[in-house]
Amino acid sequence: MGRSLILETTFLVDLEREHNRGTPGTVIAVYYGWAVRPITAANAPPTLLREDYRADYVLMVAEAFQADHNTERAIGALGFLGTEGQKYDPYAFVSDALAFGTQNGYSVVDLELLQGLLAALLEFDASFAPTPTP
Amino acid sequence: MIREPERKPPLFLLTGLVFGLLLGLVLTWLVWPPRVTEVGPANLAGPYRTQYRLMTALAFAASTDLGRAQARLALLGDSDPVRALSSQAQEALASSDTQREARALASLADELGAYLASMQATAEAVNTPNPGGQTASTPIEAVGEGAAYFLDDQQLTCESAEAPPYVKIFIFDLKRNPQAGVQLALSSEEAEAKFSTGQRPEMSPGYAEYPLTPGVAYTLSIQGIQMLSGLQAAACQTEEGEPAWGSWLLLFNAEE
């Protein structure tokens, strides 16, 4: 009984020491695993695309729209950026891309393409327009 | 005689560190991985990659901007983008509803394939040593020091009696890929002309050309550093035996 208690105490003390020694290693590994080499997403949905890639996708839609002037088709293509099975707001996608392009030095031609698509969306369905805040 | 206790290396510190490292990696990679919120097109799942490729092709069909389409396709990280486009075009061709998409995909595959083939052929032609190159009448001296590029090859090409003489420059980076946007200057006693690579992407992103006036000696600078002097239009004979002004073909590679 006494021997068992001593062994158990020794084990717990060893474990605590091991834990204290392991702390720097844990900190290093956490930094490495989260900051230096985090796991990257595979098979990601487009909702996770970085802002510049989202904006460029919208620009592709605007380029294609310039050729066929098919608004329904453009709205369908913009659905790519929405969450599957949920309602999406094509106006917001184009509006965000236009804001990104303006801030990040898109060419005038590209900005005009985005503006053209935005105007076409409003013409197609006025309810796409953002609700003014009081 | 008192024996000193044997000193053991502090291995226990190492085991603690290793234990901590393992624990930390298990936590960060398995238990609480960081929430990924921003990915590139290469990380998209299969069907989304297909849609991204299709949209690239439709945008190309409208704008015919091959450089932009190529850059977008590169984001997908396909090992063979031409093949990926072709096989997607084949699939689209199977359905009558997606004929437009099939045409756009096939068109981009064709254009990109032709462009990549011509780029490869250009690089091979420029890299092929020309035994007659050394007998050209115009001497060209390298004068640059501390330059980021070196002259790897020079040839005088004699294409046509009607064509004006040009200096045609190809610039390749350290990985021997054509490099766009490299600033070049051709200066003579009277004037200086500035231009850059990439303005004729149909030739190569690393290509630039400038017409030479016969009888004028030029100095060529790359990124503000003098590289060649005494560059002049040189007389030559075409394959048909007609006298002509030849064009200088210069290949520069990045210094390692």
Image (cartoon, coloured by chain):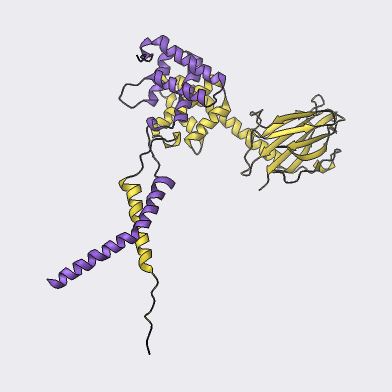
Relative depth, front residue between A102 and B137: A102
Q: Is residue B19 above or below residue B3?
A: above
Left or right, A55 with reference to A47: right
Residue sitting at x 42%, y 36%: B39
Instruction: State which quadrant residue B170 falls in.
Output: top right
Q: Is residue A64 above or below residue B206?
A: above
User: How far across and down, in percent of the image, does residue B157 sit?
Assistant: 78, 34
User: How far across and down, in percent of the image, does residue B75 sit?
Assistant: 49, 34
State the hue of chain B.
Answer: yellow
In the picture as drawn, the residue positioned furthest to the bottom comes out as: B1
Q: Is residue A66 above or below residue B231?
A: above
Residue sitting at x 79%, y 40%: B228
Whether residue B104 can be seen here: no
User: How far across and down, in percent of the image, does residue B33 sit?
Assistant: 34, 44
State the hue of chain A.
Answer: purple
Whether residue B80 can be seen here: yes
Residue sitting at x 19%, y 66%: A8
Relative depth, front residue between A13 and B93: A13
Q: Quadrant of the N terminus of chain B?
A: bottom left
How many numbered marks, from 0 up?
0
Residue sitting at x 50%, y 24%: A101
User: How far across and down, in percent of the image, does residue A43 sit?
Assistant: 38, 37
In the picture as drawn, the residue positioned furthest to the left comes out as: A1
